[in-house]
Amino acid sequence: MTASKPIVALLTDFGPDSHYVAQMKGVLLGCQSSVSIVDITHSIVPQDIQQAGRVLLDCIRSFPAGTVFVVVVDPGVGTERSIVVVEINGQIFVCPDNGVLSLVLDSYPISQVIEADHQVVPGRDSATFHGRDRMAPLVGKILNGHSLASLGQPLDAAHQIEIISPDQTGDLIAGEVVDVDYFGNLITNLREDILSKEKWANARLEVSTVRLSGVKRTYADVTVGDPLALFGSNGCLELAVNCGNASAEWSVGAGTAVRIVVSG
């Protein structure tokens, strides 16, 4: 499926009420007035490249081929780090070359990587706002039919960083909470496919002082106010309280260890 008009999806750590987002949208609309701009989120924890990568991976499956994703989570803004334009699975990504695409690159084959030449988009160039002054104009050129090859020099690969992964020793799997969603559910880095359904059904789960047995299918499989574990829509284990806020009630946040004891 390909969209009937161009789609640009924005992902930043600018904050939900930031006027920086509007400035980027203004540049994009000035380049292509018919573009449809989608806000993935602007509430990424500041400079949290790994969180941005997880959100990006969760979202890209829902967008049609040809979507241009612009990711501005950029601790190195103004430095010599590159800006890259990457084609992956029929979609285009414009972002700093700082590892934010690591999870996407682990999941999909890469078609091409271009190190953007900032001379391609001359104009104002703030050292603190490459999203507006470099990335948005690059996207404008893509929307107006410029080939990716015309935007800079090819690279063999985009930069990747080490992603936090669970560690398994015998019957013990050590993972951690990597995100807390709006509802206070604890999102872990433990994926459903690391164990069989039978093993998950009999596993013992531990986070902080909370102990759980097995994995449920829905939140409503336990009484309101009771804790549970289940797999979220992204295939990762979530620890939650039915109609409650697990993070607040258990005083647990990102970085907290999660232990899985496998039985049988």
Image: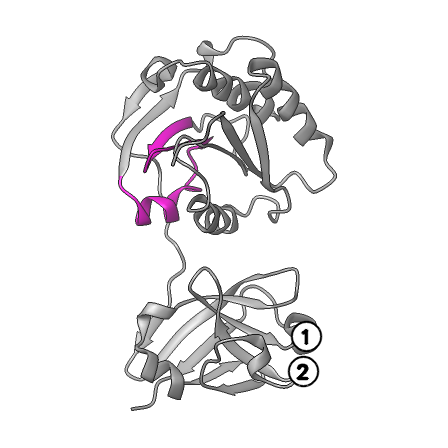
Residue that extends furthest to the bottom in the rendered view of this protein: 264
Image side of residue 23 versus residue 55, left or right: right
Task: State which tag comes first along the sequence, 1 or 2.
Answer: 2
Residue drawn at x 45%, y 10% is: 119
Looking at the rendering, which quadrant does residue 35 occupy? Answer: top right
Residue of label 1? 243
x and y percent of residue 219 in the render?
57, 76
**Residue at horizontal 69%, vertical 75%?**
244
Q: Is residue 128 magenta?
A: no
Q: Look at the numbered disc 1 and give the secondary structure of its residue.
A: loop
Q: Is label 1 in contact with label 2 (beta carbons under 8 Å)?
A: yes
Label at residue 252: none
Residues in magenta, as a range: 83-109
Q: Amino acid at mark 2?
A: Val
The amino acid pointed to by label 1 is Cys
Give the CA distance from mark 1 to mark 2. Answer: 6 Å
Where, quadrant-wise, is the C terminus in this rendering? bottom left
Residue depicted at x 37% and y 52%: 162
Q: Position of residue 176 (x, y in %)?
A: 48, 69
